C-alpha cells in the first residue's frame, strides 16, 4: 500500500512543521535565553514559527530576550526556512550521493513552484550560490558601516552584519535592535543594502536567473518574468508615492525628517511591505490611509519561488488581466500576445480567494480573543502574519497566548499553504473524456 506521505503536497508542510517543533525545543533551552531560565512554550513556539516561516513577528524583544545562541538559532532557522527545507535536503542529497531519485525531484519541484527543470543539480547549486553571494555582499557593506561609522568592534560589526544580511535576503525581518531600523532611518549605507537584499530575495529565483540571461532583451522574457517584474515595479512605485504623500507631514513618521531622508525612509518602508519585515519608521503612528495601503501590499507579497509571502505578484497581475478581458468581452485572457491557460486563471482565483478567507477568519478570531485592539490594527497583524511579512504596529507582544497562537497558524499556513494547495492542484489535475451540458447562472 502506498504511503500517503509520499505525496509532496503532504510532505512539504510536514517538513516545515517538524522543523518548527525542533526549533521550539531548541528555543526553550535555557542557553537560548539571555536571562536565567527557559522561555515559555508559546514564546518559543511563536519565535520558532516566525523564523522558519521567514516572517519576523516577535512577542519579545529579540536583542535582549534571546542570548547569542538564540540569535544564531534564529539565523539558522531563517536560512533554512528561506532556502526551503526540501530544497536544502535535495541539495545535500546531490552533494552526498551525486544522484537524485524521482521522489526527491518531485519534492524539490513542489516546494519551489516548479523552479527546477531537467538540470536539477546545476540549478540547486545556482540557487545556493545566489543566496550566499547576495548575503555576503550585504554583510560586507554592513560590516564596514558598523565598524567605521558606528565604532563597533570588528567582531560585533561582522556578526550583526551577517545576521541582518540573512534576515534581509530571506525576507525574515528579525533585527538586533529594539526599534528595528528606526535608528538608521537616515543612513543609506544601512537601509539601502537591506532593502536591495529584500528586493532580490522577494523577486524569485526563476526571475533572477532569467534576468541574468536576458536583462537587455525584455522582449524575450517569459510571461512569468514579465508579470513579476512589471507588477513589482508598479506596486513599488505606488507604495513609495503613498508613503510620501500620506506620511510627509506626519510628526510620528516622516514629518521630522529632511527631504532626502523622507525619500530614503519612504523607499525603504515601501520595499519592506513586500515581505521584508524591517521597519525604519514607527508603524504604530502611521496614518490610517497608509495602513490600509500597506495591508494591500503585504497581502500581494513578492514573486513566486521566492522567500516572500502573500498571494504573489503573478497571481495579482493575472487577476487584473482576467478582469480586463471580462470587461472587454474577450474570449481569452491574453498577456503579451500569449493566451493564459484556464488552469492558471482558476489557480489564481483560488489562491486569492483562499487568502482573503484566511485573513478575514484570522481577523475575526483575533478580534474575538482580544479586548481594546482596534480593528485596523488586528487586520494589520493578521495580514502581516499570513503574508509572512513581519511588520507590526506593536500589539503582538501584548496579545493573549490564544491570539498569538492564531498568528502562529497564519504564519504556517501563509508559508506552506500556497505550496500545498498549488502542488495538490497540479497533482490532481485530470482530463475527462466528456463534458457536461453548459448552463449560465446569473452573476452580479
Image: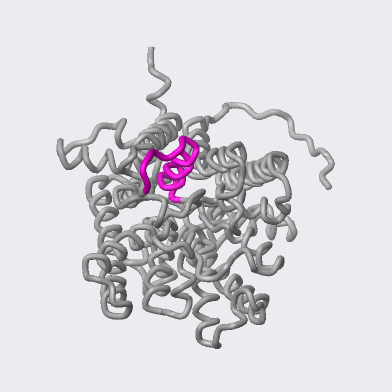
Boundaries of the magenta span:
35-54
Quadrant location of residue 342? top right
| Residue 261 coordinates in the image, percent (x, y) | 51, 83
- Viewer-proximal residue among 118 and 183: 183
On the image, the x and y values in percent for residue 374 come to: 73, 54
Q: Residue at x 60, y 49 (%)?
A: 398
Q: Position of residue 335 (x, y in %)?
A: 56, 60
Horizontal side of 34 relative to 426 (left or right) equals: left
Q: Is residue 209 magenta?
A: no
Q: Is residue 419 visible from the viewing direction of this image?
A: yes
- Residue 215 left/right relative to 323: left
Q: Please tell me whether the stretch drawn in magenta is mainly helix, strand or loop.
A: helix
The count of marks equals 0
Determine if residue 115 is in view. Answer: no
Residue drawn at 41 percent across, 66 percent down:
220
- Most extreme residue toward the left is 97
Residue 256 image-quadrant placement: bottom right
Query: Residue 403 is drawn in which quadrant?
Result: top right
Instruction: Tell me the residue at 59%/54% (across/down).
Output: 299
- Residue 338 in the image: state x and y as whole percent: 53, 58
Q: In this view, does 272 lie above or below 434?
A: below
Q: Which residue lies furthest to the top in this view?
A: 1
Q: In this view, does 409 lie above or below 147?
A: above
Q: Which colour scheme is used?
A: one colour
Amino acid at each position: 500500500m502506498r504511503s500517503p506521505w509520499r505525496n509532496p503536497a503532504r510532505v512539504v508542510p510536514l517538513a516545515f512543521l517538524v522543523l518548527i517543533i525542533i526549533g521550539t525545543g531548541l528555543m526553550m533551552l535555557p542557553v537560548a535565553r539571555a536571562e536565567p531560565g527557559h522561555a515559555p512554550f508559546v514564546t518559543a513556539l511563536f519565535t520558532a514559527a516566525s523564523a522558519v516561516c521567514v516572517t519576523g513577528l516577535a512577542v519579545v524583544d529579540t536583542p535582549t530576550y534571546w542570548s547569542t545562541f538564540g540569535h544564531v538559532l534564529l539565523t539558522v532557522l531563517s536560512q533554512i526556512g528561506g532556502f526551503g527545507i526540501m530544497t536544502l535536503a535535495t541539495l545535500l542529497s546531490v552533494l552526498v550521493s551525486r544522484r537524485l531519485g524521482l521522489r526527491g525531484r518531485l519534492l524539490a519541484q513542489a516546494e519551489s513552484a516548479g523552479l527546477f527543470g531537467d538540470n536539477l543539480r546545476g540549478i540547486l547549486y545556482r540557487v545556493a550560490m545566489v543566496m550566499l553571494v547576495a548575503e555576503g555582499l550585504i554583510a560586507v557593506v554592513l560590516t564596514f558601516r558598523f565598524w567605521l561609522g558606528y565604532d563597533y568592534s570588528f567582531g560585533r560589526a561582522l556578526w550583526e552584519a551577517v545576521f541582518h544580511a540573512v534576515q534581509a535576503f530571506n525576507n525574515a525581518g528579525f533585527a538586533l535592535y529594539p526599534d528595528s531600523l528606526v535608528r538608521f532611518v537616515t543612513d543609506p549605507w544601512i537601509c539601502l543594502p537591506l532593502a536591495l537584499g529584500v528586493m532580490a530575495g522577494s523577486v524569485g529565483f526563476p526571475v533572477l536567473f532569467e534576468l541574468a540571461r536576458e536583462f537587455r532583451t525584455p522582449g524575450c522574457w517569459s510571461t512569468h518574468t514579465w508579470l513579476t517584474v512589471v507588477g513589482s515595479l508598479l506596486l513599488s512605485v505606488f507604495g513609495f508615492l503613498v508613503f510620501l504623500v500620506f506620511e510627509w507631514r506626519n510628526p510620528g513618521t516622516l514629518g521630522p525628517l529632511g527631504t532626502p531622508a523622507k525619500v530614503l525612509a519612504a523607499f525603504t518602508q515601501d520595499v519592506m511591505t513586500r515581505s521584508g519585515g524591517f521597519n525604519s519608521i514607527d508603524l504604530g503612528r502611521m496614518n490610517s490611509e497608509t495602513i490600509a495601503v500597506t495591508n494591500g501590499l503585504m497581502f500581494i507579497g513578492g514573486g513566486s519561488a521566492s522567500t516572500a509571502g502573500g498571494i504573489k505578484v503573478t497571481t495579482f497581475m493575472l487577476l487584473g488581466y482576467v478582469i480586463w478581458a471580462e470587461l472587454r468581452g474577450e474570449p481569452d485572457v491574453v498577456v503579451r500576445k500569449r493566451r493564459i491557460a484556464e488552469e492558471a486563471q482558476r489557480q489564481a482565483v483560488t489562491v486569492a480567494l483562499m487568502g482573503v478567507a484566511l485573513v478575514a477568519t484570522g481577523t475575526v478570531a483575533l478580534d474575538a480573543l482580544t479586548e481594546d485592539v482596534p480593528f485596523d490594527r488586528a487586520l494589520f497583524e493578521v495580514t502581516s502574519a499570513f503574508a509572512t511579512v513581519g511588520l507590526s504596529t506593536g500589539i503582538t507582544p501584548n496579545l493573549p497566548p490564544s491570539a498569538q497562537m492564531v498568528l502562529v497558524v497564519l504564519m504556517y499556513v501563509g508559508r506552506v499553504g500556497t505550496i500545498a494547495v498549488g502542488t495538490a492542484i497540479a497533482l490532481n489535475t485530470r482530463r475527462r473524456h466528456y463534458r457536461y451540458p453548459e448552463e449560465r447562472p446569473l452573476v452580479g
